Image: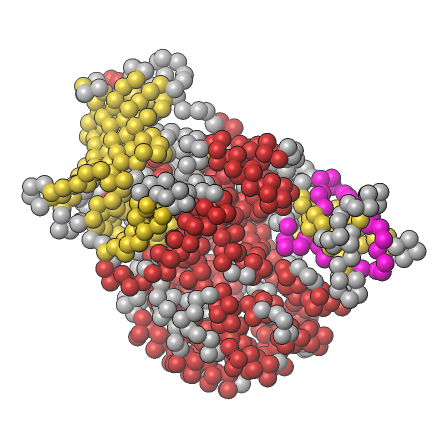
Amino acid sequence: MKDAAPRTIHLKDYAAPVWRVSAVALDFHLDPAQTRVRSRLSLERAGGSAGQPLMLNGQDVKLLSLAVDGRPLDARAWRIEGEQLWIQGLPDRCELEIQTLIHPDQNTALEGLYVSGGNFCTQCEAEGFRRITWFPDRPDVMAEYTVRLEADRAAFPVLLSNGNLIDSGDLSDGLHYAVWHDPYPKPSYLFALVAGDLACQEDRFTTASGREVDLRIYVQRHNLDKCDHAMGSLIKSMRWDEQVFGREYDLDVYMIVAVDDFNMGAMENKGLNVFNSKYVLARQDTATDEDFVAIESVIAHEYFHNWSGNRITCRDWFQLSLKEGLTVFRDQEFTADQSLRAVKRIDDVQRLRSLQFPEDASPMAHPVRPQSYMEINNFYTMTVYEKGAEVVRMIQTLLGREGFRRGMDLYFERHDGQAVTTDDFVRAMEDATARDLSQFRRWYDQAGTPVIEAAGDYDAANHRYRLTLRQSTPATPGQPDKLPLHIPLAMAVLDSQGREIPLRLEGEAKTAGGQSGERVLELTAPDHVFVFENVPEAPVPSLLRNFSAPVKLRFAYTDEQLAFLMAHDGDDFNRWEAGQQYAVRILLGLVREIQAGRALEADERFVASAARVLRDPDLDPALVAEALSLPGESYLAEQMDAVDVDAIHEARNFLRRSLGEQLADGWRAIYDRYRDTDPADLGAGAMGRRRLAGLALGYLVAAGRSEGRALAYARFREARNMTESMAALRALMDCPCEEREAALGAFETRWKEEPLVLDKWFSLQAASSLPGALDRVKRLMDHPGFNLRNPNRVRALIGAFASANPVHFHALDGSGYDYLAEQVLALDSLNPQVAARLVKALSRFKRYDNARQKRMKQALKRIVETHGLSRDVYEIASRSLE
Ligand code: B3K
Ligand code: ZN
């Protein structure tokens, strides 16, 4: 229990800063045990009355001295209240000098200045700068930074900060220094410094207007052979942002530093990105295709922040999606342009549906622009990021690509150098296109996943097709009543040959709607009826094409119609979606059979439609792989009123086994066709072929015959890259056989010195549904490669167990919950941010049966009632229990 419940911060209480900081000069004397920081702030009163004091934030920093305009500050002029320092009687313009002392080597929270692998690095977003020095640590205070670093030359030969290097040199006593200047005013959360013994891979980039930029990736020396892909990705991203958004880079150098201990993926500090090494390091033998794609997308994401986040930043943290939703949208588009667009869309929608939809239906549900928080770090969520990206995508759908680009141009031009709000963003979109998005703005303020109930009715006598659409959004905590949203719904209707019928609405001029069969309907009222004319036969509608809005769409398709759409829909996303809906229906039917104690049978028509997809020569292998991957257990859980983890698992395994057995020849043919795909080819085509070969191998093992296992084990031994190796290992993971243990053992021996590879090994075991998973996880915590202080290890083992092993995490005896509660408490005193993420696995206890609910609640109570809990964990655990 918190000794006093933490304060809740509300958007409605936002007040502009009273003091501006035009420039900051920071001076660091770096020493892992005791770092001295001197900071000089050029202050200016920006508003408020003359007597209004200055408030600075600080956390775990020791104040050594305070001086104003060169004179020590009188003790009566300042006071510290908790984490706030108040200074009174300042002149309207002055220079404030502050000296502080911090202890980077004791910083296990990995916020502020800390030590990772013997090197110094920082993480300041959201509120980490206040752990370095006292400062108005809020994003709407933007200042020009000059940073001097001084450290031991032998231990820390590389000294980096934001911007351009303006001076450096040697000092006495083995010390040296460097001075960096960043000409672009920025909020404190974008400050960064790195100091250490690092090797560097260099390249160059010439921007569209001819600026020469040095590109540098810094890593620990032994990782220097794993930087090529990251560098290539950076260059591609820089080019793409010029071509697609007209955005150029603006400094002489762009640096990326990889560190092993990092709370999230990466951080977009101006000119000096700090990355989790997981999103930089890759070599064919250590990284899978998914890793390569993820690296490219995170490098792109952080690079794109230079404009959507750094040049234009957030006024306050409630506006986080202004930069995150927009930047996710931009990185999604970038990846789509490098690969098969539909495959990227399918992957993103799967992520949204399996992670964001559940969040939107949980006690932690919050709007894209939250109204309140206790700990802002808890709001770097799927909602703010992924739903936020969907909101931007809907704007693009409503305005069209061209209109959207005009809106983006205006946004960049109008707000360059400012800290703004999501409202400012939407206004730029409106002003550039003369569209009214006032109702659309509700997407930023209403939590919960909207539901659209659709029904179609064909009037054969008059050749009319009537489409009825009704929208509603479920209540979420603090928001019992919802207003109708402005929803773009892309759709077409198909004739019996699968062709799109040109659509004309009743009363519309002959030319309207064009020849194209696809339209975007705009829903604004709770109910709409659209009547299409000249529809020659009863059509099959293809609705919400390309997932044009983040909603749940319900339409009572027959099995035949789903099979028909699977075969004919001209929208690749919806083709896949029809197959998924069909699979969900079959799987939920199996769940009911299991619950009723009846024997299971695989639906013949479903198997036949899967067989057709498998044999379809026109389908890209990546799309075949998507189509034949069964919906995940968490997505299936979402479709049930009361989640039955065991039945879901059994049903899914049964269907997998049936597809494996009944299509065995097809799988084998596919595997043989694609198994030799060039292992060095990292193009989307080759990745798609490997994905399908891996899926085929999985089905061959799932079929339960010894040939499958032998094939997978042989593949494992002969693997030519990590994708092949992991596909084989994953295929064996739920199979209690010798091959599994032999492969796991060999993998460990080979990769025990490569932490990122060992993480894969931890995760596979943590997610395995074989008996004894929890014991294995507990034993693995004693593995020499495991370390509770490293967020990647925690996520790989404990995180994977809680999020990817429903059967064991939700074991009826509560052992999974107790284990998680213990780990959360152990972690909370080390790293609250990482601990808080883990608690979320307990949040949705109401979705389970009474016995499990009781045990989950007990685990949550045990957490909440612990003294000295962090704000991070307290907020999530207490809200879950409300
Ligand atoms: N902006 C950072 C996330 C910071 C998280 C702070 N708890 C990475 C990103 O979204 O690009
Ligand atoms: Zn981001």
Identity of the residue furthest to the top in this view: 50
> Which residue is pictured at 11% across the width and 43% down the height?
170
Identity of the residue furthest to the right in this view: 461
User: Residue 449 magenta-drawn?
Assistant: no
The image quarter in which residue 227 lies: bottom left
> Which residue is pictured at 47% across the width and 43% down the height?
246
- Whether residue 571 is visible here, answered yes or no, is yes
Identity of the residue furthest to the front in this view: 210
Please indicate whether residue 414 sits to the left or right of residue 272 in the image. right
Q: How many marks?
A: 0
Work out whether residue 599 or residue 417 is closer to the camera in this orientation and state it: 417
> Which residue is pictured at 46% across the width and 73% down the height?
727
Please indicate whether residue 720 sits to the left or right of residue 614 in the image. left
Q: Is residue 304 above or below residue 80?
A: below
Q: Work out which quarter of the rendered image holds the C terminus and state it.
A: top right
Residue 432 % position (x, y): 59, 34
- Whether residue 324 is visible here, answered yes or no, is no
User: Residue 539 magenta-drawn?
Assistant: yes
> Which residue is pictured at 85% across the width and 58% down the height?
536
Residue 195 % position (x, y): 22, 47
Work out whether residue 605 or residue 329 is closer to the camera in this orientation and state it: 329
Residue 716 % position (x, y): 41, 79
Q: Work out which quarter of the rendered image holds the N terminus and state it.
A: top left
- Which stretch is magenta? 521-548
